[in-house]
Image (spheres, rainbow, N blue to C red):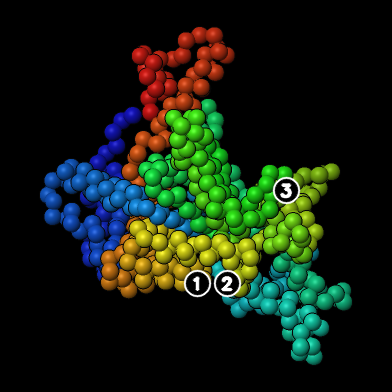
Amino acid sequence: MAEQPVASHPWSLADIFTGTGEDYLRKPDEQKAIILRGRDNWLNRFVSQSNAATADEAIREEVQALFARWLRMQNLCVLMGAGASYYVTKALNANLLDSAAKLLVGRRSEMTLRRVRELASQPDAPGKKIEQFLSQLVGFVTLFDSKELPLDKAPFPAFDLERGSGETNHAVLRELLLDLERAVAATCNVDLPDSALATWADDSITPHENFLSKLMARDPKDGRAKLFTTNYDTLLEQAMDRLGILYCDGFTGTVGRKFNPAAYDLDHYYPGELGEGRVRRYHKFVQLYKLHGSINWRKTSEPKAGDPYGVRFDSRPVLRHDEVIVAGDGEARNRLDEIFSPGEGLAILPTTAKFGQTLTMPFAHLFRSFGNALQQTQTVLFVIGYGGMDEHVNQMIHDALVNPGFTCVIVGPSPSDWAKRLCVADYCGRVYFVGGPWGYFETFAEYLLPDLEALKTDIAVARTLRELRSTGRNEGPPDQSSKGGNQNGDASA
C-alpha cells in the first residue's frame, strides 16, 4: 500500500489546533485535531518543533503513549453514546423522530402525530427536542387519564386529536406513544458492517471491532473492562461475537433469559489441566451495562416469579427500519405491530422521565454499578459519542471527580456544552477532551489507541481460511500477489 501524504496523515502537525485551549472552547474547530487537558491545549508542546516530519512522529508517539498509559490503568470504564454508533445508524436524537415517523405511514398514528405537531409554534421543535416532546406526550396521557388521579375533575386540554370519532385523546395518544416506541426500536436495529472477521470477501475492520480488540489486549492481571452504554443498538454485542469475546449483560439462562444482577459477580477461568495445574483467568471477557435497556429488552406490564423485575430478554429478531414496510398483495403492508408483544415496550423510553425510571430495578443496579466503578482507584473513563444530555449520567461523572484516582477522557468531533463546562471547571488536570478529526469514533479506534497487535492474528486466520476455501474451489494455487500471503507463505497482517 502506498504511503499516505504527510499532509493527510492523522498525526500531521499542520492538522492540529495550535491556539490556546480557551480559544478553542470559545470557537471549536472540527477541522483541527486537539487534545485539551482542562483548559489547556495539551498539543501545544509540539508547536515549537520546526522539523515537520520529526514533529509528526513525536505527536504519534506521545499521543499513543498517553492512551497506552490509560489502557494500563487498573480500572478501565467506557461510556458510549449515540455518536459512537452514528457511522452505522445515521441516527441521533435530532433526527430520530423524523426517522421513526416514516414508519407510521398509513397508520392512524401518522395523522395523530401530524395534529400533535400543529401544537408547536416551531414545526421542527418536536424533532430537535425529542425527549421533551415524548415527555409531553407521556404527561398528556397521564393527565387525560384523570379518573385515576386525585384531581379527577381537572379539565382536559381543548384539542381534539381524533376528530368526530368520539374516542378519547388518552387512547389516541397512548397508541401514538406505543407506535413511536416500536419505531425507535426498528430505527436502532442495525447490523454491524461486514469485516474480515465476518466474511471472506472483505479485509476491513469495523471501528467497534478495532476498539474492543485493543481493550482485550490489556494485561490480564488488570481489572475487567466495563462497558456502559445508553444506546439501544446491539453493535457492541455483534462485535464481541465476531471477536470471540465473552460478555455479561446481566441476564442468565439460554432459552428464557432473565435479568440477574448477581451475574456481574461471576467470571470465567481456564480449567486447571489447561493451565499447568493452575486456574487462570480468561482474558477476553467484558462486563456490559445497557443503562437504558436494549432493542431486545422488553418491559412487561406485570412482574412474574421468574421475572421479578418486569424486564425480559427477547431472543426473537427485531424488524429493521427497512423491514417494517413490506410489499404484500400488491399493497404496502406495515409490520410495526410485530415488533413488541401486547403489553410490552422498550425498557426505558427516551423521555426526561428516564431519571425516575433508572431508580427502579434492574436499572438501579446498573447505575449503582456505574457509580461504584467510577469511585475505584486508578480509574479511567472513556466517554465516546456522548453529548451530556442525560443529567442523571452527568451527575455520576461529576461525583467521580472527587476521586483523586479518576481520569475522564471525552471523545467527540466538537465539545458539547457539557464537555465545555467540565473542561473549564477542571483545575486538577484530570479531564481531557479529544476533538476534531480525532474525535470521530472511527479515527479514535484506529489511530489514537495504540496498536497492540491484538487483531492481527484473527485477521491472518480469516485470510488463511479464505485462501484455503478459494484454493479448494478453483483447484489451483492462490494468486501469489494477493493480500493473503507471500511466496514464503507468511500471512500479511
Label 1 near label 2: C-beta < 8 Å? yes
Please tell me whether residue 181 is drawn above or below residue 334 in the rendered image.
below
Q: CA distance from mark 2 to mark 1?
A: 8 Å
Q: Please tell me which residue is depicted at 73% across the width and 76% down the height of the picture.
A: 141
When asked about the image quadrant of residue 310, the answer is: bottom right
- Is residue 156 left or right of 454 when viewed as pictured? right
Q: Secondary structure at mark 2?
A: helix
Q: CA distance from mark 2 to mark 3?
A: 28 Å
Q: Please tell me which residue is depicted at 28% across the width and 63% down the height of the picture.
A: 37
Residue sitting nearer the eye, 251 or 462: 251
On the image, numbered disc 2 is attached to which residue? Answer: 355
Name the kind of residue labelled 1 in the image.
Glu
Few, some or many C-alpha atoms within 10 Å of disc 3 (few <14, some 14-19, many ≥20)? few
Q: Secondary structure at mark 1?
A: helix
Mark toward the start of the polypeptide (2 vs 3): 3
Name the kind of residue labelled 3 in the image.
Gly
The circle drawn on residue 391 is 1
Q: Please tell me which residue is depicted at 31% across the width and 64% down the height of the picture.
A: 430
On the image, numbered disc 3 is attached to which residue? Answer: 256
Q: CA distance from mark 1 to mark 3?
A: 34 Å
Picture mark count: 3
Closer mark to the observer between disc 1 and disc 3: 3
Residue sitting nearer the eye, 168 or 226: 226
